[in-house]
Amino acid sequence: MQSDKTLLLEVDHPDARACRMAIAPFAELERSPEHVHTYRLTPLGLWNARAAGHDAESVVDSLIRFSRYPVPNALLVDVAETMDRYGRLQLLNDPVHGLVLRGLDKIVLVEVAKSKKLAGMLGARVDDETILVHPSERGRLKQALLKLGWPAEDLAGYVDGEAHDISLRQEGWTLRSYQQEAVDGFWAGGSGVVVLPCGAGKTLVGAAAMATASATTLILVTNTVAGRQWKRELVARTSLTEEEIGEYSGERKEIRPVTIATYQVLTARRGGAFTHLDLFGARDWGLVIYDEVHLLPAPIFRFTADLQARRRLGLTATLVREDGREGDVFSLIGPKRYDAPWKDIEAQGWIAPAECVEVRVTLTEAERMTYAVTDAEERYRVAATARTKLPVVRALVDKHPGEQILVIGAYIDQLHELGEYLDAPILQGSTTNKERERLFDAFRDGSLKTLVISKVGNFSIDLPEAAVAIQVSGTFGSRQEEAQRLGRVLRPKADGRQAHFYTVVSRDTIDTEYAAHRQRFLAEQGYAYTIVDADDVLGPPLPQID
Amino acid sequence: MATTFADQLRALSDEALGALIQLRPDLVVPLPADISALAVRAQSRGSVARCLDGLDEFTLRILDAARLSRSAETALTSMAAILELAAGVQADDVRVAVDRLRVRFLLHGTEDALQVTGAVDEVTSPYPAGLGRPADYLEPQTAALVADKARLRRTVLAAAPAARAVLDRLAAGPPIGALSRDTMAEPVRWLVEQHVLVPITEAGRAPRPDGELVELPREVGILLRRETGPLGELRPFPPLPETTPRDPKSVDSAGTGQVMEAVRSAEALLEALAAEPAPVLRAGGLGVRDLRRLSRSAGLDEPGAALLLEIVYAAGLLGEADAHGSSRSVTVSRAGAPVDEIFLPTGAYDLWRALSIAQRWHTLVRAWLSMTRLPGLVGGRDDRDRPINALAPEAERAGAPQARREALLVLADLAPGAAPSADEVLELLSWQAPRRARGREASHRDALAGGALLGVTAIGALTSYARLILEDPDEGDESDPLGVRAAAAQQTSDSVRLLDGLLPAPVDHVLVQADLSVVVPGPPEPELAAELDVVAEPESAGGASVFRVTPASVRRALDVGYTANDLHALFKRRSRTPVPQTLTYMIDDAARRHGGLRTGSAGSYLRSDDEALIAEVLADKRLIPLALRQIAPTVLVSPSPTSRLLSQLRDAGFAPVAEDAGGAAVLARPKVRRAPTRTSLAARLADQAGPPVLAGPRLAGVVEQIRRGDIATRAARRAPVTVRAANGQSTTGLSSVQRHGEAMAVLQQAVRERARVWVGYVDSHGATLSRLVRPVSLSAGYLRAEDERTETLHTFALHRITAAVPEEE
């Protein structure tokens, strides 16, 4: 236990497992490198634990019991005081007045009622302990109370929505134990986010949640391709038929008992107004599933605030949001209900083990000179798209004959160069959906070995047999992007082969600095990470370029 | 009373006299000449008050009982009378208390004829035990009421609930109540009408601004206290805390955690000050913004940071330094003004840092216990509503160490693990010495808060190692300073040893992980800490500490002289886990780039595109004194200045050309020495000799001005005698009043006729002047007149005008 409220867990300690079980309810896993995992105590985490029925005494007890060193008195006091703040206010469904805010502690109720931040959310005062709440403000009120440090216990419950029979068809497969735990955790909590690595079967968690809810479901996904995959999975794994699943996208506008909509179509505006918002009210949805919740666009947050009475499930591989709005995800969709370190799931054999290798190429004199005189804004592009990378990529591709290889980049010009150089098709933003599916099918059945993709491939494409990923350029060392790209190769391989994840960077340039961010992120997730020189990959003699 | 106070003292055995002196040590400072002098001192207000300050609540109550039970005639009381009043408690307890008073000579005489020492009445409340004065002392009707016991009881029972509440409040004491100015509330009016309450005016004091006073007579008070006894509720023993005691082991464990935290925070604060010293405010102390910055950087709240800063200052680890003596050339406060003094860690800080955690903690705690500061005041406002800053003189309180000790001794007196709440501690303190505890609540609370922050207490109870520090006997201080000091040192070392045993053992290894974080799984050894300080950035601290190796930190290590191999060896030696390949790679990468650019200073350089020429110069023996050094195939540098380099090269037969900073060749024409340029004397003469050339109009103006001035001067010489005389001695025989009146008449006429007048007046410096003017107006005590010579309008105060005479044409 550290004074900055982080917890360090020695993984190799015999009690590590028991300790992890004990602290998981209230501490957030922050980093999980090979020896010492870091957890963090946050007010949010403590309140969530309180919501899940853990009291301060038990939290303090776990801290003392598993701490190797004496825990400072002040921290224990702080934990107890923080947890004590939860539940002083309750959101209730009053049989007479409808939704009300009840204060078990009058002073706190008076304090929050006076706050300017809550202006307009609270209605008339019923008595000393009760204030009316406009049902539409439920989400925003909870958010605001959280910011004030007096989180309300939401006991108002959920509407069941329109019932619709859905069941899992477990033929030849079963729900994995952690998937079941995730669904149970979600259902017990009512709403929340499930964090699972890419390839760990988040779609199935969603399907299982739908089966548990047995109600009409709205599924929000990032793009059409991802939506079709959901549909395919649902048809294959559940009792749902093609006809019961609607697609609500730029191309089609179907509303069926289970509707899959893209973020893009929901946030599309016509004349400044969101035109597709009616979808939320089109049916009495019993469950709303947010796929890739870390990408949830800001407008959807606002709509979500109005959906507080419905069960909400967020699915993601990482809660890291580059815009730092994790807190909003928690307060609007719900707290994190399940989370397992990637390495744990890998150890269970559900995702492929991966080796991350950073290959540093040395720029030629000419390239170094070009880089040296480039403006700061252009430097990354110059460094990332250095032609010197091409032979290295070729060498890496050659190293894995017969394996499915993805080459990922951010700059279209570079991708075209690569495509020509490797003689591989290119998938980019302008590629039509039809062409995309054709390429994917070819890749899936093995007739296509190497595919060059742009940033569009970052999200939700299911390429089961990709065993090697080579990234040549990215979005400024974005950790979220890294997680997604890694996810591309983590789908379990038929023969249990190891996955390879290569990053080609230019030495002594800003490219290296961004790579350092990614390296830290991957190492924190517990992946083996090595750095090699391009010469080791290419081997002598040096190839002649041009 | 047959014997006097002095006689009784004289009759004491040596032991009893010794006991008295031990209990009231102030009696012998300075040493009294004889017993009479001792007696006088023992009855003095100051000494009696000091003695009373140290007595507990019960003993004071018994003293009150003695005062109450004095007979009106003889002013004597007896043990029996006291026992009767304190019937509610064990007689033995009362006897013990009476004995305590007698040993201290606050009561003296025999058991049957006890006398209360004179000064006691002067320094204690006029209402012993919170009871008012007897009724016959106050009002005859009330005396009559009180005399009839049955009637009194009936009257009290007849009181309405509101009136009864008033009575009960007064009965609990003090027996005096204030009324608001005009309106006597109904219940009170009723009580006064029934003569249960007596309106009084406070003797010897100014009438209270907020209204009248009423007093509850003693007899009524005693009647109302039927249930508790006449003295009110008596507590012969200190109130016991009700909170459940903690397990002493978990107390020590939590305390030890806090000890590490406190030491670490203190160090973090000082390090933050070392990195960015804070200016000392003009009025002394540390500015609010600096405190905020420091508390943030140390991860503390502001009161905690203020407390630790006060402690490290008291411990001599923090001091003021001259801002200009520091390595930074100018230290500027945040407001932008240069400052004279800054707060910096002292040399003692470096010594302190080398100590073990337990020793470091002891330094802090000893400083805390003895510092005459009340850190709780910091952040508040003083009497004049000015904010009190940390380390500012306003937070000085001489009584702070004693208050701190008192509060902690309360905990020390309880069984290990007892964890009374702050309120319970204050309650205990107010029982132990009510007179002293009054007004010290803030100090006591401050002490408890400070103790918790330092790990002296944990989860409300005193830790075992802190108990050892507190256990040195207070009384011994003066009698045997040498022995006590030795004993204190002994206790300290015991405590350090105990704490050392509780603290986790320092570790000498780390865990290095692939994300380049370095985890020290415990408090690091000083040597390891020093190494990590250089090669890694601290990220999180506590029981264990987390560092991170970054390219910058590796570069820093390379800068201080580590080589890549040293770093590899360091991590290999210290790490329990295999050193990750990424770290190795990063160190090599940083080492490869380290020193890629070199810098240095030289007096001059010599460059040439011709490498052979450079080689030739370098090989030339005649140029050895220039100490040329080749830093590139085409560049040589020398510590000598350019001029010397040039001349020596030329002497050696080379043909160098000098360059300026921009690289352009400097033309080197031989320079001849010259004095600074001055203006030619001839030119100046010519200028003066030449006739000034003036343009026509300007010339005319000049002439006109001269003429007008000339006229005025001559006119002034012709100023009438009267005016000049009025300004000087009076020769006309007129009084000054007459002359003034005459002058006014002249002026009024002149205004009408717009005639010119000689005016004599006294100016603001007292000088007398005269002036020829043309009056314009005469009003509001001022004369406004035009002076034609200077073409200005003058204003004269009439009272300054001494004379006025029309101009004679």
Image: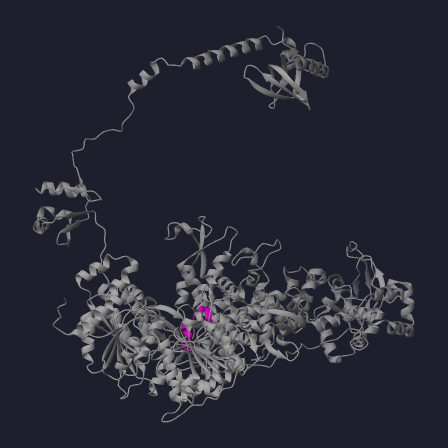
Residue at 14% across, 48% down: B607
Residue at left 49%, top 70%? A302
Q: In the shown orientation, is residue B209 left or right of residue B272?
A: right
The image position of residue A255, as x and y in percent, is 46, 79
Looking at the image, residue A182 lies above or below residue A319? below
Name the foreground residue: A420 vs A316: A420
Q: Does residue B159 appear left or right of residue B253 in this picture?
A: right
Give, as a single range, the part of the protein colored magenta.
A290-300
Return the residue found at the far top: B809
Front-most of residues A460 and B795: A460
The picture places residue B130, in percent across and down from the top left corner, at: 77, 68
Pick whichever, B661 or B316, lies toward us: B661
Q: Is residue A428 left or right of residue A156?
A: left
Location of residue B777 (image quadrant): top right
| Residue A514 visible in the picture | yes
Q: Name above or below for residue A234 compared with residue B258.
A: below
